[in-house]
Image (cartoon, helix red, strand yellow):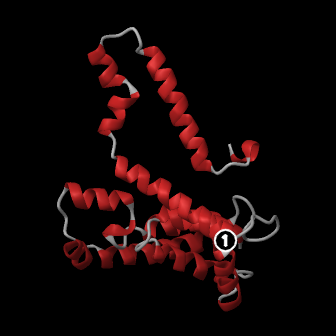
Amino acid sequence: FKTVTHLPPFMGMMLSLGIMWVVTDLLHRRKTAETRSEFGVLGVIRRIDTPSVLFFLGILLAVASLQTAGQLRDLAGVLDTSIGTTTEPGIYLVGGIIGLLSAIVDNVPLVAAAMGMYDMVPGTFFAQDDFFWKYLAFTAGTGGSVLIIGSAAGVAVMGLERIPFGWYLKRISFLALLGYFAGIAVYAIQRWIIFG
């Protein structure tokens, strides 16, 4: 969508939602009012978690604002000068830091922010589908489990199952952190075995 229209991906999601709304209303227009209200888009919207959807739309909008203002590029510059992202150890460190940040901030905005921080330049660690992006997907997804608030799923489970933040912090966070670092070690070993 972005390649063709040059619009942000969330605009494509909203367009898809609008198209689904029209198609669903056309499919159910001759049915009873009860069926239309149950299977129509309004009935579905009543059952979805609208605050979560608005949360993600807001986060993506905020990340796009930071990218447009140049803040993400500045952050990438700071990481490049202080840590160095031209070497593999530097990439491991930057990805690991971003992964640990996903325990505090949801992984979706962090990955979106990282996409705004680094250009996908061929021949570098940041080339499309290259090392950094695969590693970032792992660290951001796994690092969110260190704290229960690190992912939307964790927040949802916290509300549904009444899991207190302190209980998770005492009993699960350390194990999740060990798993996070063990996963990074396995990732590094696999990369070393495959690419030398």
Residue 41 image-quadrant placement? top left
Q: How crowded is mark 1: few (under 14 residues within 10 Å), some or many (20 or more)?
A: few
Residue 112 in picture, x, y percent from top left: 58, 62
Asked if 47 appears above or below 76 in the picture, the reply is above
Residue 148 image-quadrant placement? bottom left
The answer to whether residue 133 is left or right of residue 123 is left
**Front residue of 41 and 132:** 41
Residue 6 in picture, x, y percent from top left: 73, 48
Residue 151 in picture, x, y percent from top left: 39, 63
Q: Which residue is drawn at 38% across and 53% down?
A: 52
Q: Which residue is drawn at 31% across and 23% down?
A: 37
The answer to whether residue 100 is left or right of residue 33 is right
Quick check: can you spot residue 39?
Answer: yes
The answer to whether residue 74 is left or right of residue 95 is right
- Furthest residue in direction right, as rendered: 123
Q: Name the residue under label 1.
A: 69
> In the picture, which quadrant includes the C terminus?
bottom right
